[in-house]
Image (spheres, rainbow, N blue to C red):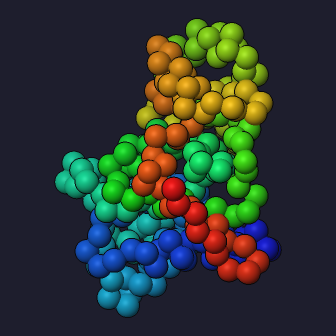
Amino acid sequence: MNPTEQAKKRAGYAAADLVQDGMIVGLGTGSTVFFAMERLSERIRQGLTILGIPTSAQASLRARAYGIPLTTLDDHPEIDIAIDGADQVDAALRLIKGRGAAHTRERVVAGAARELVIVIDPGKRTDLLSAAVPVEVLPFAATPVIRRLEAMGAATAIREGVKKDGPVVTDNSGWIIDCDFGTITDPQSLETTINNIPGVVCCGIFSEFTGKTKVIMGDAGGIRMFSS
């Protein structure tokens, strides 16, 4: 396991150890969260009782493989804790998410959670957000949305599938437009502006959850925690 994978594992395991018996747990999508699922699986075998709410088909398949019992937001609209990853985290704990094309459902789960725990490796920590912003759109609206985003200064690209011709299709049947805005000086304003474009389902900037966000970063020496 390389140093980045070791850091992810430390962060994921530390997040899983915050889960208490009887909790409803939001399960994000991505490699660091899968380490958290691995640790939750160990704790379930030791007697922990939880229910998970996955944020994607991939997360659902992985959780089932780990033996994590699942439920839905219909049955549990309030979540005790959500464990998720991020593409970038800035100094104010604002996030860019969506590399796994699951950020719309991840936002819903984050909004329903009392506590949002973000697990990262050191490469995801930054002073200012600058990563490409994924924007999920209705396919019907892709062209006008792209024009609006480019008028805002973004370099845009419809995300293409791997081992599949054509666009990536999300679990919501949307497309992903990756938008490079360069350094983002006002994430909250940009998030609001993008999300208000007709045809946009959700963008990957998460600036509204900082008050309940805890970031766990794994590194060579163990873990570091950040909260607002």
Give the residue drawn at x 58%, y 9%: 144
79 in relation to 180, above or below:
below
Between residues 211 and 15, which one lies in front from this camera angle? 211
Give the residue drawn at x 79%, y 74%: 3
Residue sitting at the far right = 2
57 in relation to 219, above or below:
above
Residue 166 position by quadrant: top right
Give the position of the N terminus as an image quadrant.
bottom right
Query: In this orientation, does residue 84 appear?
Result: no
Query: In the rendering, at what x and y percent does residue 30 appear?
Result: 58, 57
Query: In the rendering, at what x and y percent does residue 192 appear?
Result: 50, 25
Query: In the rendering, at what x and y percent does residue 18 appear?
Result: 43, 75
Residue sitting at the far front = 228
* Side of 193 relative to 156 (left or right): left
Q: Disc count in the image? A: 0
Between residues 56 and 132, which one lies in front from this camera angle? 132
Query: In this orientation, does residue 68 appear?
Result: yes
* Side of 157 relative to 197 (left or right): right
* Side of 160 relative to 173 (left or right): right
Give the residue drawn at x 69%, y 27%: 179
Residue sitting at the far bottom = 46
* Side of 144 relative to 173 (left or right): right
Residue 20 position by quadrant: bottom left
119 in relation to 15, above or below:
above
Give the residue drawn at x 55%, y 22%: 194
